[in-house]
Image (cartoon, coloured by chain):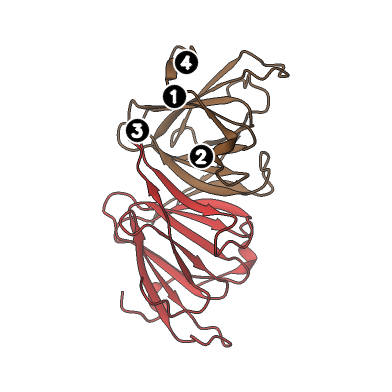
Chain colours: A red, B brown
Amino acid sequence: MDKINVEGVLLTSLKKIHHPKGDVFHGMKKSDAGFSGFGEAYFSTINYKDAKPWKKHLRMTLNFVVPVGTIRFVIYDDREESITKGNFYDVILGVNNYQRITIPPNVWVAFYGEGEVYNLLLNLANMEHDPSEVERKDELHEIEYKW
Amino acid sequence: MDKINVEGVLLTSLKKIHHPKGDVFHGMKKSDAGFSGFGEAYFSTINYKDAKPWKKHLRMTLNFVVPVGTIRFVIYDDREESITKGNFYDVILGVNNYQRITIPPNVWVAFYGEGEVYNLLLNLANMEHDPSEVERKDELHEIEYKW
């Protein structure tokens, strides 16, 4: 496992269970590490070689699972009080690295489509979508990082 | 909307939100009709022209969403106390009919892969997987239905 150098971020390996008629993939159980309540589940897709730029949630904890394709996530910590302030965490998740990433509120997240065919992300969030708790930087270069 | 002829089954239309870098698909909010608590989220896949035969959950409420491909669901009601006892409900869900199906405990469910490429099902269940609350009929013909 990669060293996680942003405080509060958690990676959790998930089981893929083979079935001759179609496999089963774990997502999240309420007893799992990183679970902090259920508010909403939604899917996001990201095209090959496209990035959805930086967002920061002020209250939402994200739990991302990638059941189809491959997505690269970059997290940037600019929290004043954080012991990992200034750090970036970069991880590629998907069918070949099937893990859940838990992302606490108040860090910046962007993601990039690595898979050529289809990249699907499930977010299991601890609250319902509320645009008032989201900050955005609409251009990827607004946070300097070597993608 | 199809008439739902099995008591307690609910179909809920879900939004697909277009985004130039990859669409967003709703799944479930805790304030939605059919939500009865979060226990576990998992994915199941079903190969083209394969069926996963009948299961009956004694306590779990299922919430199925099909974000990739197309899956046919058949529900059979043999509950003694049900006003729809003896009925079957048959529905095809997927990217071209993007709805959530809520299935109460104590009815039989089987599903069939209609999509040729990949068929993915998300279950948002109100309890964690517990094999002691699942009954199975391992052969599709054990419940007579014209697939």
The answer as to whether the residues below labels 3 and 2 share one chain is: no
Three-letter code, disc 1: Asp
Three-letter code, disc 3: Lys
> What is the chain identity of the residue bearing mark 3?
A
Local crowd size for mark 3, using a 10 Å CA cut-off: few (<14), some (14–19), many (≥20): some
Q: Which mark is residue A21?
A: 3
Position of residue B7 relative to residue A133, above or below, is above
- Check contact, mark 3 vs mark 1: CB within 8 A: no
Local crowd size for mark 2, using a 10 Å CA cut-off: few (<14), some (14–19), many (≥20): many
Q: What is the spatial separation of the Cα atoms under label 2 and label 1, in whole angstroms? A: 23 Å
Q: What is the spatial separation of the Cα atoms under label 3 and label 1, in whole angstroms? A: 13 Å
> What is the chain identity of the residue bearing mark 2?
B
The residue drawn where x is 36% and y is 61% is A93
Q: Which residue is mark 2?
A: B65
Give the foreground label among 3 and 2: 3
Q: What is the spatial separation of the Cα atoms under label 4 and label 2, in whole angstroms? A: 26 Å
- Check contact, mark 4 vs mark 1: CB within 8 A: yes
Quarter of the image where one finds residue A96: bottom left
The residue drawn where x is 35% and y is 27% is B50
Q: Which residue is mark 1?
A: B138
Q: What is the spatial separation of the Cα atoms under label 3 and label 4, in whole angstroms? A: 18 Å
Q: What is the spatial separation of the Cα atoms under label 3 and label 2, in whole angstroms? A: 18 Å
> What is the chain identity of the residue bearing mark 4?
B
Q: Which mark is residue B142?
A: 4
